[in-house]
Amino acid sequence: MELFFQSVINSFIQGGFFALWAVGLVLVFGVMGVVNFAHGELVMVGAYTVWVLHSQYGIGYIPALCIAVLLVMFIGLLMERFLFRPKQGDPLGGLINSIGVLFILQVAALVVGGTGPAKQVAPPFPGTLIIQEFLRIPNQRLFSIAVAVAALLLLWFFLTKTKLGWSLRAVALDREAAALQGININRTSMIAIGVSGALAGLAGALMAPISNIYPTMGHNVIITAFIVTIVGGIGSLSGAVLAAVLYAFLHTFVTAYFSGTIATMCGLLIMVLVLIVKPTGIMGQKVSE
Amino acid sequence: MRKTPKSVFERKFGRRRFLGTTLAGVGAALTAGMPRISLADTKTVKIGMNIPMTGDYAPWGLPGLYGSEIVANNLNAAGGVKIGGDTYMIEMAAYDHGYDTEKSVQGFKKLVLEDDVKMVMMLGGSTVASIVPWAMRKKMLTTTLLPSDITPDTPYLVATCESHPLYNVTGVEWLAEKNPDLKTAVIITTNDIEYGKQSAATYKAAFEVAGIEVLDTNFHGFDVVDFAPIVSSLLAKKPDVFCMATDVYTTPIVEQLFHQGYKGKIVSCTLDGYQDVIAKTSKEFVEGLVFQFPDFDDPKLVGGKINFPDPGGFDASFNKDHAGEWSAVAWEYPSILLNWVEAAQAAGSIEPTAVLEAMKANDSPAHTFGPGKWWGAELWGLDNAVIGDWPVVAINDGRARIQEFRSVYTWCQTNVAELSKQMKDLDLRIA
């Protein structure tokens, strides 16, 4: 039973991260129709920013986190303006451009951080919350999950209660109809990738104190984000959050009771099954041509 | 008339002035602070490094190049190396294969055919396997850090420094001797054949010999983003010893052990960047953590049987220029370079076959931590790995400190049957 309860806790924490990774990817795909393959690398940039500012230059963790969010948001805006906008209506072109960015960011990380062992950030919130001797939650993870949930709630509020959020959803539903209603598509795209970048930066900054930081850490992020996005329903934000939590439970429990390799295989298998049986995912909607 | 960049250059640095300044500079460089060697007598020998300098495996390549350059520069500054009747300056020629097998072949051929290197140092694994057919036909002296790359068909491939993962046995042996009450262990490692499984098999053999039962072995992929579930699963077995046969993920794993309240002993293959581990846990938690790779400013590396010139100076020099980039290979490739120098001097030649012959003719080759022995026939079919003593390192008061040196050779000679059995159980190739 000890392993079971600890696994439940582990699942919720992982779910928060998975959701944060996937939601940004979903947002950009929904609004811009672009699969941003560099999304994982944006997370990596967030983590590196915290490592540089907090661990190397001694800036406080929270200011470093805020700068990471702003920096990655800015990179996202540059990508939209110079890479995705010229390729509007050409999803393949956008995809290839994002792959180019992926490599550039990896090399940039190598230049900034050098080689050697993976970079580490000492946890700014050390210590462990001990509920029972067998049920423990590191304070850093508690902080991360709280911030992740707050960010997702904020995003939900933004999308459902603000005019800008409505315009984002309108463009995601029907680009042309939205444009006919006077919604500025370019500006909406900028907002979408800005929010996506900010979430990626936040995810990286939250991950920095609890995981290895290295130039290719984005690979694992993007694979998980894809699984979650497809299972949740491409373009569905609520689907992504639900799928993130479900996938985190599946992955954690299979890892704990069988092995991590089998857990990853299960995730990919479920993604394939969803594509065959219900291509719209758990909460995606079928869109007529 | 607009001045062109050329005219500006000519005005400021006339041809005569330029030539005069250059000659004066060259003259000064050759006379000031340099050893008195006649240029006519000095030749250059190139040593190749076909290693990953980018990508995930870069930490096991690039620091080795930095280290080798420090050692080569030191040798050159001391007047070069006398081999036969000639004095040689050593030049490192490196190629980045990014741990890609095709690029590895390309790099190897470039180093041999274009750069005319006399030895090629490599990391090991699939990138070595890919060059073996061509390298062996060319009779090119090649080195690896993974002796498991050696087969009866690789007479020109040697492992003269790191004998991954054989040295791990010393840590377990030492731990068991100091703590006779330890009865059970769990092992965590990566699920690759080249590093993870070799290491797991060796640790299993070491635990078996030490009378410690291995309750579970977790082989994980390189895609783990959170070690909490794996660590929870292993801790549920209540082990006395938690063994990390892996090297990439030691920090997040120890961090999880700390947060999940583990109270037993920890043994690890490596613990590069252990200060980060301490920062993420506590000095008290990692006290006594046993691993295999010392800091090079360790007092026990001074004098005695150590075959590495001024380890402390090397450590300081490396960390001055490449702070934060240290990994075990930082001293391992230079150590192999020193093996080459010793053998080339004995051979009186820089030619690969002659150097190899001299290496193999030496019954007691200079290994970093003392005299070594050629070994490996019983496990891989050829005695092409040098094994000898290896340090057992433990964290004491926040510093990695050598506890003692133990003989890997003696352990292997005594327990090769158990080692073979464990390798076979994990489907690893043995002779």
Image (cartoon, grey):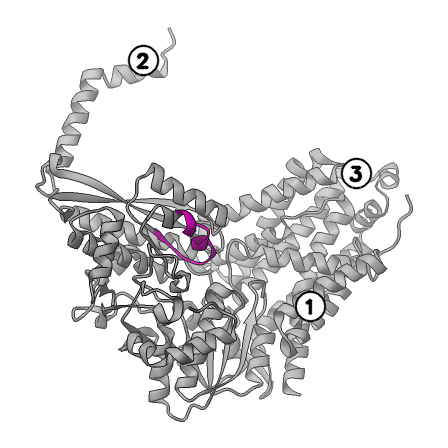
Residue A184, label in figure: 3
- Local secondary structure at mark 3: loop
Label 2: element kind: helix
Q: Which of B122 and A164 is in front in this view?
A: B122
Chain letter for the residue marked with disc 1 in the picture:
A
Farthest bottom residue? B181
Q: In this view, does B26 lie above or below B150?
A: above
Please give the name of the residue rendered at 35% of the width and 59% of the height, measured from the top-left corner.
B329
**Circle number at residue B7:** 2
Residue stretch rendered in magenta on the structure: B121-134
Residue drawn at 31 percent across, 77 percent down: B413
Q: Name the residue under label 1.
A: A15
In the displayed structure image, the side of residue B306 where residue B288 appears, left or right: right
Which residue sits furthest right?
A288
What amino acid is labelled 3 in the image?
Asn
> Which chain does the residue under circle 2 lie in?
B
Q: Examine the rendered structure and indicate whether residue A201 appears above or below residue A18.
A: above
Q: Identify the residue at image location x=57%, y=66%.
A: B221
Characterize the local packing of mark 3: few (<14), some (14-19) or many (20 or more) Cα atoms within 10 angstroms. Answer: few
Amino acid type at mark 2: Ser
Q: Do the residues labelled 2 and 3 touch (CB within 8 Å)?
A: no
The reply to whether residue B354 is in sight is yes
Give x and y (percent) for residue A262. 66, 70
* Left/right of residue B369 with respect to residue A147 in the rendered view: left
Asked if badge 2 and badge 3 are on a common chain, one would say: no
State which mark lies toward you, 1 or 3.
1
Label 1: few (<14), some (14–19) or many (≥20) C-alpha neighbours in 10 Å: many
Q: Where, quadrant-wise, is the C terminus of chain B in this rendering?
A: bottom left
State the CA–CA distance, disc 1 to disc 2: 67 Å
* Contact? badges 1 and 3 (CB < 8 Å): no
Gap between marks 2 and 3, in whole Å? 55 Å
Whether label 1 touches label 2, CB < 8 Å: no
